[in-house]
Amino acid sequence: MLRAALVGFPSSGKSTLFQLMTHVKEPPRGKGEVHVGISKVPDPRLDVLTAMYNPRKRVPATVEFTDLVAPRTGAQALVDVAGYKNADALVHVVRAFREVAVPHPSGPIDPARDAQAMEDELILADLAVAERRLERLDKDIKKLHAAELKQERDLVQRCRAALEEGRPLRALELDGDDRKRLRGFQFLSAKPLLLVINLDEADVAAAGPGVEAAAAHTGLTGFLARAATGAVALGATIELEIAQLEPGEASAFLADLGLADSGLDRVIRATYDLLGFISFFTVGEDECRAWSIARGTIAQAAAGEIHTDIQRGFIRAEVVPYDALVARGSMAACREHGEVRLEGKEYVVQDGDIINVRFAT
């Protein structure tokens, strides 16, 4: 399962957004209180497959979101929270709405200032972690003189230098081995970052489904040009109204705003896309399910998402592209037309593949 953690300054709408996306009835209120909720990844392909097979269960891919009530300098508080250390991405809710009844703790509404301020906090929190790790590595190297420890020290020194220059670690260009080492440190500024620009109701229709207009309006265009950084624009107030409507009424409401889908769906999909994840499907009368994997995952590893026993006993994968299955109407018809392939362990799974794994028990 993908894991994302919400960050944001007070009065940004962060906990409201968490509540809307995860349907958790009560957002966290006390300082240090952590809530975790699950959001379903919207995918029309799963709807089509469910209609074809009429299974007993429909199981979408999911994203786990974590929310924490932290003090104003919240990044230091996140360092030791498992839901943040283990998150695959951070989602920063940035206030762009102008509600005089809800004053901003820093004064004027300035999304670019808040985005940079949070970035600076993440960098400072990581710098403290890097310095502590270097102290420990220096002691360990004096005792062991291990090559792996020296390589790790070189990487952490490089990270410290970048952090001291005010650069987030997600911007570092690293080779495969160093990327694996960096993941082990669980640095916050190394995680991909999604900005959720929380707009006034009046600005939502003008911004449209894209983010360029909202970014230009809020001064965030330059910030979003950074590596591994994405954005979605929405209005939490409108989203709250939409969430309380029947599906047909909600669609009409969105159409009036010039939007094809809700901002909440766009946040979930953008998180999924930012991390480079794709979905493959398993289908049948019992269940139609979407599975989340990183782009570039091989078939045997993808089988492990279904069950570790299937990964261990992997023999072959029967694979048919989503478009072919929908066009033919059944797996049997795809077989008749030679569109079901047998793939081995090293096959790189593609987005939308329908997969049936043959395995030995």
Image: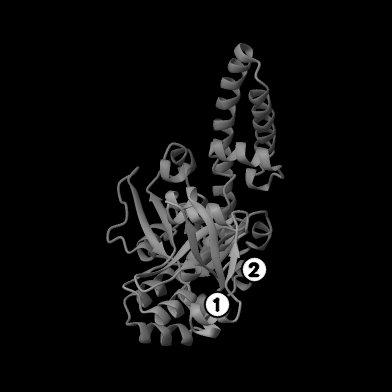
Task: Tell me if residue 86 comes above or below residue 252 in the rendering.
Answer: above
> In this figure, which residue is indicated by the disc labeled 2?
216
Q: Which residue extends farthest top?
A: 143
Q: Name the residue located 54 percent from the left edge and 84 percent from the top edge.
A: 328
Pick whichever of labels 1 and 2 is earlier in the sequence: 2
Task: Look at the numbered disc 2 and give the secondary structure of its residue.
Answer: helix
Residue 231 visible in image: yes
Identified by mark 2, the residue type is Ala
Identified by mark 1, the residue type is Arg
Tell how many labels.
2
Disc 1 to disc 2, how far (Cα)?
Answer: 51 Å
Task: Look at the numbered disc 1 and give the secondary structure of its residue.
Answer: helix
Left-right relation of 226 to 133: right
Q: Which mark identifies residue 335?
A: 1
Examine the image and state in which quarter residue 290 appears.
Answer: bottom left
Residue 258: x and y in percent read 52, 84
